[in-house]
Image (cartoon, rainbow, N blue to C red):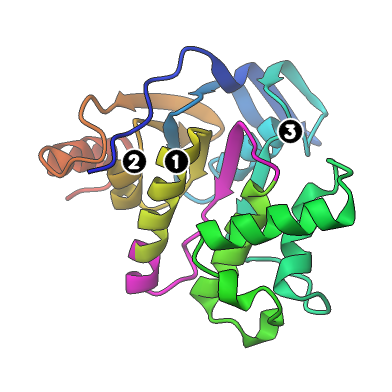
Amino acid sequence: MTLAPPRATHIAGELRDVNKWYGDHHVLTDVSVRVDRGEIVALIGRSGSGKSTVLRVLAGLSTDHTGHRCVEGAPALAFQEPRLFPWRNVRTNVVYGLTRNRLPKAQAQQRADRALADVGLADRADAWPLTLSGGQAQRVSLARALVAEPTLLLLDEPFGALDALTRLSMRTLLLDLWREHGFGVLLVTHDVDEAVALADRVVVLEDGEVIHTLDIPDPRQATNADHYRAELLDQLGVRN
């Protein structure tokens, strides 16, 4: 059995006391979230609670906020929609993830081919995005995010549009890649079961504020999953 990477001793990404407004609307209020290397943190909450805004601030896509942001290197992102360029083949889509690295073309393509092999799509490098299944397209999106070997991977409901079996397969793939590379993960999800299944820690957001943090001492074990699920649903105001 493949063991999880050792617990991290330094930060992959952190927000401290972050506030953000959209006009007069106070979207985030004193939000603090930390992700260490080798750790998976899930961020859950109802629609409109500010989950994606937290991710955008941590990614550096939204800079008009107050508070402290610290990220090691350039974080990588993957979204619910794969957002592949239909006029580029799979390999070239993955190479796009190396834009900041400015590698020679041949080296960039080699990196892309390794990333595609990691996600099980080495044989589809020359395929066009429109010929891929939904799960394959999401694997390409994940390869594009990981090709630059980031310290922090930011995922915005990446499996939400997939069918149940493909979603389970993608969860397994994510864990395999995380164990191999040891990056930190912030997973934004509306799925409590997914959060419990994947995370070392679950942060609950409501109306732009962190209202609860659940540390899972036995992460990725089914033993106490029902207990953790019940605690999180209670925090979300959902009867179970």
141 horizontally vs 105: left or right:
left
**In terms of depth relative to the viewer, which is nearer, 42 or 219?**
219
Image location (x, y in percent) of residue 104: 89, 50
Report the magenta residues as a range. 148-168
Decide which of tag 1 and tag 3 comes sooner along the chain. Answer: 3
Q: Give x and y (percent) for residue 70.
A: 68, 18
Instruction: Indicate which disc residue 180 carries.
Output: 1
Q: Nearer the viewer, residue 192 or 142?
A: 142
Name the side, left or right, on which 76 lies relative to 39: right
Label 2 environment density (alpha carbons within 10 Å; few <14, some 14–19, many ≥20)? some
Q: Position of residue 188 (x, y in %)?
A: 50, 45
Label 1: few (<14), some or many (≥20) within 10 Å? some
Task: Give the residue displayed 60% in from the left and 20% down from the top.
Answer: 14
The residue drawn where x is 33% and y is 63% is 168
Horizontal side of 52 relative to 148 (left or right) equals left
Q: Which numbered circle lies on residue 236?
A: 2
Eyeballing the image, is 19 above or below 163?
above
93 in magenta: no
Residue 72, percent from left and from top: 68, 22
Pointer 3 residue: 74
Residue at disc 2, secondary structure: loop
Q: Are marks 1 and 2 in contact (CB under 8 Å)?
A: no
Furthest residue toward bottom: 131
Mark count: 3
Q: Amino acid at mark 3?
A: Ala
